[in-house]
Image (cartoon, grey):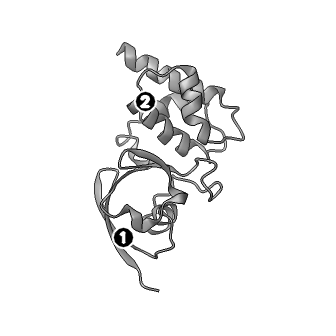
């Protein structure tokens, strides 16, 4: 089967890859580009573990075809930290033990970052609503929600 040539930007860097028409963006990220932070939890867009940003829009990468990334800007969990400096959300998740097995964590972090970029001062209800598409079986969500709210509060005070 012929492969498609795709030129895109991932985490601010120009990237080119070859993919088959039926490969999802998640498969391309993990298998072709070795960006394994995004996880496959359901392959049906129900869990949010594979959440990435495509042209500023939060999407489940298991529902986007790899060829659709042509000319787009993609942000993944690998792009959150600045070298060894964790993003404030990543740091707060660690401080509050807002992660356990880690399967859902990248998706929650990408989604929370997207929320705070859109709404830097969300209410608890807004955070819960925004993150409702991300499922976790380990943490019970409270530490995740608290972490997002604390980052928003600290950014407001800075």
Camera-nearest residue between 66 and 144:
66
Which numbered mark, 1 or 2, is in the foreground of this view? 2
Identify the residue position indicated by label 1 in the image.
Answer: 17
Image label count: 2
Per the rendering, the mark at residue 157 is none
Among the 4 quarters of the image, the one containing residue 39:
bottom right
Say above or below: 109 vs 28.
above
Question: Which residue is found at the position 67% from the left and 40% from the top?
Answer: 136
Question: Which residue is found at the position 61% from the left and 32% from the top?
Answer: 98
Question: Which residue is found at the position 61% from the left and 45% from the top?
Answer: 104
| CB-based contact (under 8 Å), mark 1 and mark 2 | no
Task: Determine the CA span between mark 1 and mark 2.
Answer: 31 Å
Q: Position of residue 44 (x, y in %)?
A: 62, 57
Q: Residue furthest left?
A: 14
Locate the C terminus by quadrant. Answer: top left
Say above or below: 82 vs 22.
above
Q: Position of residue 108 (x, y in %)?
A: 55, 39
Callout 1: SS: strand
Among the 4 quarters of the image, the one containing residue 145:
top right
Mark 1 nearby-residue class (10 Å; few <14, some 14–19, many ≥20) = some
Identify the residue position indicated by label 2 in the image.
Answer: 116
Callout 2: SS: helix
Q: Position of residue 68 (x, y in %)?
A: 40, 64
Say above or below: 37 vs 138.
below
Q: Residue furthest top?
A: 157
Task: Left or right? Give the position of 62 relative to 80.
Answer: right
């Amino acid at each position: 089967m012929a492969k498609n040539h795709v030129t895109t930007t991932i985490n601010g860097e120009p990237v080119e890859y070859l993919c088959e028409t039926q490969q999802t963006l998640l498969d391309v990220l993990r298998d072709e580009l070795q960006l394994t932070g995004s996880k496959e939890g359901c392959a049906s867009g129900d869990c949010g573990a594979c959440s990435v940003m495509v042209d500023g829009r939060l999407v489940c990468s298991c529902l986007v075809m790899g060829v659709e990334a042509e000319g787009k800007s993609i942000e993944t969990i690998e792009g959150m930290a600045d070298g060894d400096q964790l993003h404030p959300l990543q740091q707060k998740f660690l401080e509050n033990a807002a992660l356990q097995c880690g399967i859902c964590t990248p998706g929650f972090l990408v989604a929370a970052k997207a929320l705070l970029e859109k709404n830097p001062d969300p209410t608890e209800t807004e955070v819960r609503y925004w993150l409702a598409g991300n499922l976790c079986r380990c943490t019970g969500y409270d530490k995740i929600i608290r972490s997002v709210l604390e980052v928003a509060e600290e950014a407001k005070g800075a």
